[in-house]
């Protein structure tokens, strides 16, 4: 294969196009290119998926599973079509209801809730 100016130009054009797609995103409205998603038709769990089965007795919520997300330090949790503010940043920066609505009581200590820090830490890792 002979290297011609047309082929060099075409190769550069493709590389520039790929670079712009990566830097500027997919161009699809509502899709954040920085957040990986499962491939279409895939049965893989969405990024941020967490469940009672995964955390066992440390599961701090009254629902069995959901999806954590993080944007600008605001950790949110979505389950059954409802979203909740998980950390203090989300509680002040969003209009979402507080996670208290589905935060489980600690059965070993009346008046306290189960430690929610593992969900907050996992959610914040999604911002990085």
Image (cartoon, grey):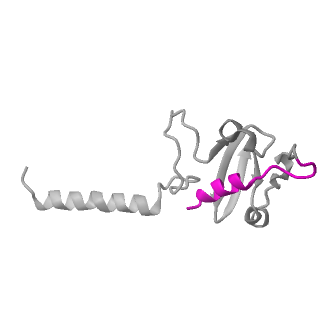
Asked if residue 106 is positioned above or below residue 128 in the image, the reply reads: above
Q: Position of residue 63 (x, y in %)?
A: 78, 39
Q: Residue at x 69, y 58 (%)?
A: 75
Q: Residue at x 39, y 62 (%)?
A: 20
Left of 3 or right of it: where is 11?
right
On whether residue 112 falls in the magenta region, the answer is yes
Q: Is residue 20 visible?
A: yes
Q: Position of residue 5 (x, y in %)?
A: 12, 62
Left of 5 or right of it: where is 119?
right
Q: How many marks?
A: 0
Q: Is residue 81 visible?
A: no
User: Which residue appears farthest toward the left when viewing the image?
Assistant: 2
Q: Position of residue 14 (x, y in %)?
A: 28, 57
Q: Residue at x 34, y 59 (%)?
A: 17
Quarter-of-image position of residue 108: top right
Q: Position of residue 28 (x, y in %)?
A: 52, 52
User: Which residue appears farthest toward the front when viewing the image?
Assistant: 108
Asked if residue 2 is positioned above or below residue 92 in the image, the reply reads: above
Magenta residues span 109-128
Q: Quadrant of the C terminus?
A: bottom right
Q: Residue at x 17, y 60 (%)?
A: 8
On whether residue 67 falls in the magenta region, the answer is no
Asked if residue 120 is positioned above or below residue 59 in the image, the reply reads: below
Quarter-of-image position of residue 65: top right
């Amino acid at each position: 294969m002979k290297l011609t100016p047309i082929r060099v130009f075409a190769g550069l054009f493709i590389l520039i196009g790929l670079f712009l797609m990566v830097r500027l995103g997919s161009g699809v409205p509502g899709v954040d290119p920085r957040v990986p998603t499962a491939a279409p038709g895939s049965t893989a769990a969405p990024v941020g998926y967490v469940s009672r089965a995964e955390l066992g007795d440390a599961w701090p919520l009254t629902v069995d599973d959901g999806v954590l997300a993080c944007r600008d330090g605001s950790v949110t949790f979505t389950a059954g079509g409802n979203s909740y503010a998980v950390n203090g940043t989300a509680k002040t920066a969003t209009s979402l209801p507080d996670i208290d609505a589905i935060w489980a009581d600690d059965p070993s200590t009346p008046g306290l809730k189960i430690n929610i820090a593992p969900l907050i830490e996992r959610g914040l890792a999604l911002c990085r």
